[in-house]
């Protein structure tokens, strides 16, 4: 199938160090995430809690020829998808904000830590802003947060994606998350 | 704004201390941050933030409720209550891979319409032009079975030009498969409905539009039970911007649609499609309507595996799901599902016409080329299996005659094939001879069938058969076994037609040749003798038949053993001869023995078992043991109706027998409806001149 081959090729190129492949892969993954989300919408109860990672996994299965991709490719794909997921959420929040003429930004229910730190919902736009700042301070920290938070990757998967040890990921994650909490509660 | 340097210091201090006790941490931080107390405070804040949440890292990921997530990632906007052109969108009625459909009210003329808004805008001038062109064509589709497209247009959303279609609104619409299930439609009604769908698809094809996404979700049935195809050609008209939308239509659509996509659709670029892809999709829908299942189960497979299955796997045979689909319906369905589009029906109307023929009990067109093809493939793949190949030729030729008779023939062929395989296993040494035999037989039959000029559509079995019967003398001077094989086919075809006296000389020749060539006790010789005896018995030449059957029985007992299925088969046949000769008491133990062994080997519901069961009942009846016979008749008829259907000759015989039995029992009220049914079915199946009717 043409698309499957195409996306797989791009991912393999990315794996071989062709950074430009990521740019061409992004719109494909973007479309697929849309399509997957539509299906979720059709079949899930609306009060069901989902992790974006479910979407990312499904998109991966649909876009990549598993027989040709290895775990490194998979991690790279997830890195791309996690980044897209973040952008999708931010775009949506922005759109919503515009519609409400500057009213409350879209609040999203979050599980776990960030909700605890912010006593409830998180402001996606504020988080995005903080992540942009984090990217300037330490790019790897930003990636770790993005992969884990938006892509739903485990510590080991994140380590694969970034080519570092799981221990490094763990430390990065604790540190960056703690910093983000402080930053967001300001 | 925090500097990189400061962030680094924060991180170092945090990492060094967050796992320490408060006291230890205070000590370390006091030392590290002696020059900068605010740094110490920030690290303490981070540690507090970290400690606040001790939940495991597994739950580190963002979680959203489904609605929030899909709102973010799914279709951009819900347009309920909005107005597009002169349509007021009232409520969303469906979300598809490509867009959302709304129930809407049109201003002039005032009417309810369905408005489909595509997810993606048209991103280039050329794609906008293409959309306009395609939508004009869609507007020209006018058919009661196609939901009419009233208008196609675009509206501005942010900076994008978003296409929409205003279409006929179908009140009370259900998908065709939901409709068939919920109204409990029988096979005939399902086929009638499906034929209408075929005609609607054909209309679109004639107007040059390929649907490209036929599936039950796009084939609706309205409140009056009439089918309406929606989204005709929509996939293509919005598919022009290749950079954007092929991905969407191909990958996005793939999701629920893969199972209805033709192998070439799965494989290649979208430009390579033609109307025969729709024929394939119709085949899948037909399969689903007949069996409530899909020909491949790929729901749980990743896309690339699913694609492979659609491209390569052989579909499930409908008859393995529902035995009553054996024969023509299966043939028709599988022809529509051929991997190679050249082998499918060339048009939707051809498919419809074959289904119509099936419904009218006329010969269908699908079988002859297909059977020839299978035979060809079969001979190529299984060269040594001469006998099975020959048996399939019987089916092939039988296919030209009538629909219902094929079930019988196919059945015989299958059994013959089984026998052939068994025998073949015993005779591997003869493989080379057998291969030559298969090919020679095939050549001869092929020649017989293709000797007619092209365009000569109404060739009857009779013409083919008489031609073969005339030609065979002297045709195989150096290949006596081939001659025997062909004579066997001729014999069995005449028997199927009820012409036993024309069959007889061929059986005699066959026995003579094999005795001479293979010996008296060779399985093939015994088989030939058995067939000759059957024919003789039908002609009332019972003394001769009995003698032959006894000879076969003795040989098989010796060679194959008492409990071999061929041994008990001839036991049963001998029993029948005796019975018809007025010696039911002698017949009873033979038939009973056959029945018991068959029930054990084949199971209770096998045709062979049922035949013997019925014969046993007859033997009991002839001896006046009516009460013992009754449950046997009733049970075998019940099983036959269920397994092979009413039109099977065995079922009809069984009906007849039970009816006579009721008369014997002085129950005319129960006998009469059965007689009527048997006669009616018999006319339909055999034609008026078959001796069984006369």
Image (cartoon, rainbow, N blue to C red):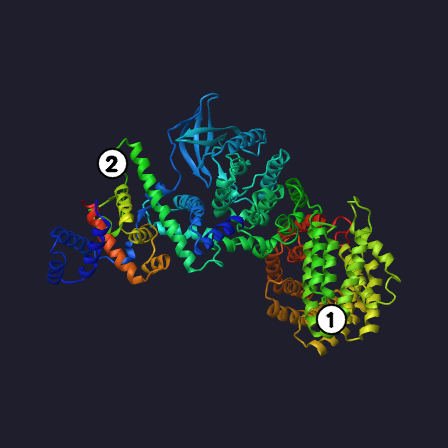
Dot in front, 2 or 1? 2
**Against B545, is A18 above or below?**
above
In-front residue for pair A1/B577: A1
In-front residue for pair B545/B193: B193
Q: CA distance from mark 2 to mark 1?
A: 84 Å
Residue B124 coordinates in the image, percent (x, y): 49, 33
Check the picture and name the quadrant holding the N terminus of chain B: top left
Query: Which quarter of the figure has residue B465?
Result: bottom right
Q: Are marks 2 and 1 on the same chain?
A: no
- Find disc 2 in the rendering and name its residue: A104
Residue B440 coordinates in the image, percent (x, y): 79, 62
Asked if residue A42 shows in the view, the reply is yes
- Find disc 1 in the rendering and name its residue: B431
Extreme residue toward the bottom, this view: B558
- Chain containing the residue with disc 1: B
Query: Along the horizontal axis of the image, is B36 left or right of A23?
Result: left
Residue B216 coordinates in the image, percent (x, y): 52, 43
Query: Along the horizontal axis of the image, is B267 left or right of B392?
Result: left
Asked if residue B585 shows in the view, the reply is no
| Residue located 64% across and 56% down the image | B662
Bin the neighbour count of mark 1 within 10 Å (Cα to Cα): few under 14, some 14-19, many 20 and up: some
Residue B617 coordinates in the image, percent (x, y): 65, 64
**Against A74, is B255 above or below?**
above
Helix, strand or loop status at disc 2: loop
| Residue located 41% across and 53% down the image | A77
């Amino acid at each position: 199938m043409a698309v499957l081959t195409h996306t797989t090729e791009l991912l393999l190129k990315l794996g071989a160090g062709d950074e430009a492949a990521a740019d061409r892969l992004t719109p494909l993954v973007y479309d697929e995430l849309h399509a997957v989300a539509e299906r979720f919408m059709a079949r899930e109860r609306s009060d069901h809690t989902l992790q974006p990672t479910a979407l990312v996994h499904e998109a991966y299965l649909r876009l990549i020829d598993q027989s040709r991709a290895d775990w490194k490719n998979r991690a790279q794909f997830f890195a791309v998808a996690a980044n897209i997921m973040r952008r999708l959420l931010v775009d949506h929040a922005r759109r919503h904000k515009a519609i409400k003429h500057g009213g409350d930004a879209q609040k999203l229910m979050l599980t776990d830590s960030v909700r605890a730190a912010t006593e409830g919902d998180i402001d996606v736009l504020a988080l995005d802003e903080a992540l942009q700042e984090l990217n300037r301070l330490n790019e790897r920290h930003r990636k770790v947060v993005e992969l884990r938070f938006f892509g739903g990757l485990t510590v080991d998967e994140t380590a694969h994606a970034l080519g570092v040890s799981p221990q490094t990921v763990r430390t990065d994650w604790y540190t960056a998350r703690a910093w983000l909490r402080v930053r967001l509660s300001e | 704004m925090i500097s990189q340097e400061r962030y680094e210091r924060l991180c170092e201090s945090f990492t060094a201390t967050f796992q320490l006790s408060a006291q230890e941490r205070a000590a370390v931080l006091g030392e590290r941050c002696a020059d900068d107390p605010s740094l110490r405070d920030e690290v303490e804040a981070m540690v507090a933030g970290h400690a606040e949440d001790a939940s495991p890292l597994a739950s580190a990921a963002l979680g959203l409720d489904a609605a929030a997530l899909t709102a973010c990632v799914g279709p951009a906007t819900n347009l309920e209550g909005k107005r597009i052109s002169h349509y007021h969108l009232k409520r969303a009625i469906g979300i598809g891979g490509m867009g959302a459909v709304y129930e809407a009210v049109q201003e002039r003329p005032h009417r309810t319409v369905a408005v489909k808004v595509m997810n993606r805008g048209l991103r280039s001038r050329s794609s906008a032009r293409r959309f306009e062109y395609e939508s004009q064509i869609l507007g020209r589709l006018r058919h009661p079975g196609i939901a009419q497209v009233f208008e196609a247009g675009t509206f501005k959303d942010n900076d994008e030009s978003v296409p929409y279609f205003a279409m006929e609104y179908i009140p009370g619409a259900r998908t065709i498969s939901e409709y068939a299930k919920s109204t409990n439609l029988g096979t005939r009604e399902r086929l009638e409905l499906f034929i209408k769908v075929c005609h609607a698809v054909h209309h679109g094809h004639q107007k040059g539009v390929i649907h490209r996404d036929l599936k039950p979700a796009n084939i609706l049935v309205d409140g009056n039970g009439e089918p309406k195809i929606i989204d005709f050609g929509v996939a293509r008209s919005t598919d022009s911007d290749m950079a954007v939308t092929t991905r969407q239509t191909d990958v996005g659509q793939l999701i629920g649609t893969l199972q209805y996509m033709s192998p070439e659709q799965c494989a290649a670029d979208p430009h390579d499609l033609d109307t025969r892809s729709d024929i394939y999709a119709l085949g899948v829908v037909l399969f689903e309507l007949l069996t409530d299942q899909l020909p491949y189960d790929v729901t749980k497979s990743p896309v690339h595996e699913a694609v492979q299955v659609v491209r390569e796997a052989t579909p499930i045979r409908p008859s393995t799901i529902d035995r009553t689909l054996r024969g023509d319906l299966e043939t028709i369905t599988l022809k529509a599902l051929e991997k190679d589009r050249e082998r499918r029906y060339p048009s939707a109307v051809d498919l419809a016409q074959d289904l119509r023929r099936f419904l009218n009990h006329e010969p269908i067109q699908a079988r002859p080329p297909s059977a020839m093809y299978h035979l060809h493939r079969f001979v190529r793949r299984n060269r040594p299996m001469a006998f099975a190949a020959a048996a399939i030729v019987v089916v092939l030729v039988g296919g030209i005659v009538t629909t219902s008779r094929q079930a019988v023939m196919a059945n015989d062929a299958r059994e013959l094939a089984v026998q052939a395989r068994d025998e073949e296993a015993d005779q591997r040494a003869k493989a080379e001879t057998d291969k030559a035999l298969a090919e020679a037989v095939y050549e001869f039959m092929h020649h017989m069938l293709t000797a007619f000029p092209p365009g000569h559509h109404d060739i009857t079995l009779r013409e083919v058969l008489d031609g073969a019967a005339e030609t065979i003398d002297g045709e195989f001077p150096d290949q006596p076994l081939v001659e025997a094989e062909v004579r066997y086919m001729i014999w069995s075809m005449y028997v199927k037609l009820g012409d036993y006296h024309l069959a007889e000389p061929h059986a005699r020749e066959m026995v003579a040749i094999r005795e001479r060539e293979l010996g008296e006790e060779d399985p093939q010789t015994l088989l030939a003798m058995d067939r000759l005896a059957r024919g003789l018995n039908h002609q009332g030449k019972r003394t001769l038949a009995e003698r032959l059957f006894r000879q076969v029985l003795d040989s098989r007992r010796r060679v194959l053993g008492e409990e071999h299925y061929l041994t008990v088969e001839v036991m049963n046949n001998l029993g029948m001869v005796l019975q018809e000769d007025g010696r039911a008491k002698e017949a009873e133990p033979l038939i009973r023995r056959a029945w018991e062994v068959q029930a054990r080997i084949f199971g209770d519901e096998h045709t062979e078992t049922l035949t013997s069961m019925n014969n046993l009942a007859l033997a009991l009846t002839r001896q006046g043991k009516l009460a013992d016979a009754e449950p046997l008749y009733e049970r075998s008829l019940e099983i036959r109706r269920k397994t092979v259907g009413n039109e099977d000759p065995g079922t009809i015989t069984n009906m007849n027998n039970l009816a006579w039995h009721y008369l014997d029992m002085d129950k005319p009220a129960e006998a009469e409806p059965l007689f009527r049914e048997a006669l009616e079915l018999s006319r339909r199946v055999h034609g008026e001149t078959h001796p069984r009717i006369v």
